[in-house]
Image (cartoon, rainbow, N blue to C red):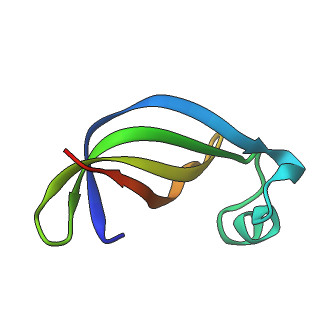
Amino acid sequence: MDFEIIGEITNIEIIAVGTGIRERGRLQKKYGRGKWRKLKGIAQVQLANGMIRIAEVHWYEAHGIGKKEFKLKLPFLD
């Protein structure tokens, strides 16, 4: 990750579940079988250059496995 999540993720929405996730096979091979979901939310992030921004983050999550592979999708301008 080239960013760090600071604080809490809010406005969490489910983007896809089960077979709707294109990366499901890869996720199961890497982390194990589970009920995988792709989610998005808004969080305050610190970028690699030290700047702090509010941004949209996406990640995968499965019960018993946890949150994996965070991606920074849309940094909002302050």
Along the horizontal axis of the image, is 56 left or right of 40? left
Q: Quadrant of residue 7?
A: top left
> Image quadrant for the C terminus?
top left
Q: Residue at x 31, y 71 (%)?
A: 2
Along the horizontal axis of the image, is 54 left or right of 32? left
Estimate the x, y position of residue 70 in percent, counting from the top left: 47, 58
Q: Residue at x 71, y 65 (%)?
A: 27
Q: Quick one: 60 or 43, which is closer to the camera?
A: 43
Q: Residue at x 47, y 61 (%)?
A: 71
Q: How many marks?
A: 0
Estimate the x, y position of residue 35 in percent, counting from the top left: 77, 43
Residue placed farthest to the left in the image? 50
Along the horizontal axis of the image, is 17 left or right of 58? right
Residue placed farthest to the top in the image? 11
Q: Quadrant of residue 16?
A: top right
Estimate the x, y position of residue 44 in percent, counting from the top left: 26, 43
> Image quadrant for the N terminus?
bottom left
Above or below residue 55? Residue 47 is below
Residue placed farthest to the right in the image? 19
Along the horizontal axis of the image, is 11 left or right of 6? right
Q: Residue at x 80, y 63 (%)?
A: 22
Above or below residue 61? Residue 28 is below
